[in-house]
Amino acid sequence: MSQFYALAPASFNSAARLCDCLAHVYGNAADHPDRVRRYPSDMTDAEWAAVRPLLPVPAWLEGKGGQPEGYCHRSMLDAIRYLVAGGISWRAMPADFPAWGRVYAFFRRWREHGLIAEFHDRLRGQVREREGREAEPSAGIIDAQSVRASASVPASSSGYDGGKKVPGRKRHIVTDTLGLLLAVAVTAANVGDRDAAVPLLRRLRTLHREITLVWADGGYTGGLVGWAKDKLALTLQLDSVGDLGVSLCGSMVNKHARVVPMTDAAAEVPVVPPSPFR
């Protein structure tokens, strides 16, 4: 992981303190007027205080090249949250945020360097520790749900789930026992749960070496159980749907976990093709 955000900045480039993000403290963000937070998706001060120490330090501040940033990190994150919450296009970004091109470049840079996943992992670890758990989980739950895809989704990346009678895509997730996301994959709806579980569990093993047990429902029976044990050293424990009580349709509390509700945004992300057993 990259270096954590500075916890106690020493000084400001600008005489007027507008924000305590690193772009304001050490960069040139103070050259732009501070925006008034007015949308429900904007972070509260308490949320920002929790998020700020978990942000990765920009390369320019670590002496790795690049120019000091000229836009507030908090405003950038609020802009991305607004886009996700509203399901809008980048070019429809409201004028009180930085220009959409700047926000997209910020998001793309984070995505290409793996910083979005890193930020998510840090937040998840913090939540787990607050609940009295270790930062890294030792058990998880796998499940899948088919969702209708919008008209903009190409036919080549969607399919028909004959069992659920749903045309579109299928989202496959693994959560920890608090319902916090560990791994996600999206396939065409006609891809079987067991087939999609192969690359998903392989990725889970790569990302979370401490996990030894994964609960699943009856949709994951068959050779997958032995494959997971032999290839990944994972115990795939099968429970009936009634015992497990896991549903991706909403939050449900059961003997193993409460699984976070999913949004239809998953139907819009690129499809991850499954791999055969090997």
Image (spheres, grey):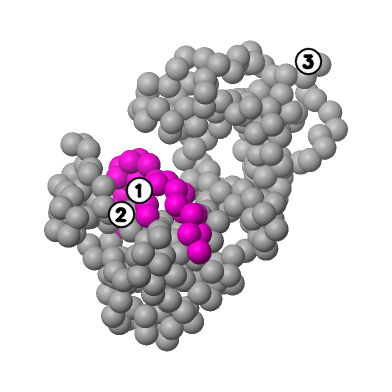
Image depth: mark 1 or mark 3 in front: 1
Whether 248 is among the magenta residues is yes
3D distance between C-alphas at marks 1 and 3: 48 Å
Q: Which residues are magenta?
A: 247-272
Whether 152 is among the magenta residues is no
Badge 1 density bin: few <14, some 14–19, many ≥20, Cα 10 Å: few
Question: Does the residue at mark 2 contact the one at mark 1 (Cβ under 8 Å)?
Answer: yes
At label 1, the amino acid type is Cys
Q: Secondary structure at mark 1?
A: loop
Question: Does the residue at mark 1 contact the one at mark 3 (Cβ under 8 Å)?
Answer: no
Query: Which residue does the image show at 28% across and 61% down from the upper left?
Result: 273
Q: Front-most of 154 and 261?
A: 261
Residue 60 can be seen, yes or no? no
Which residue is under mark 2? 145
At label 3, the amino acid type is Ala
Q: Secondary structure at mark 2?
A: strand
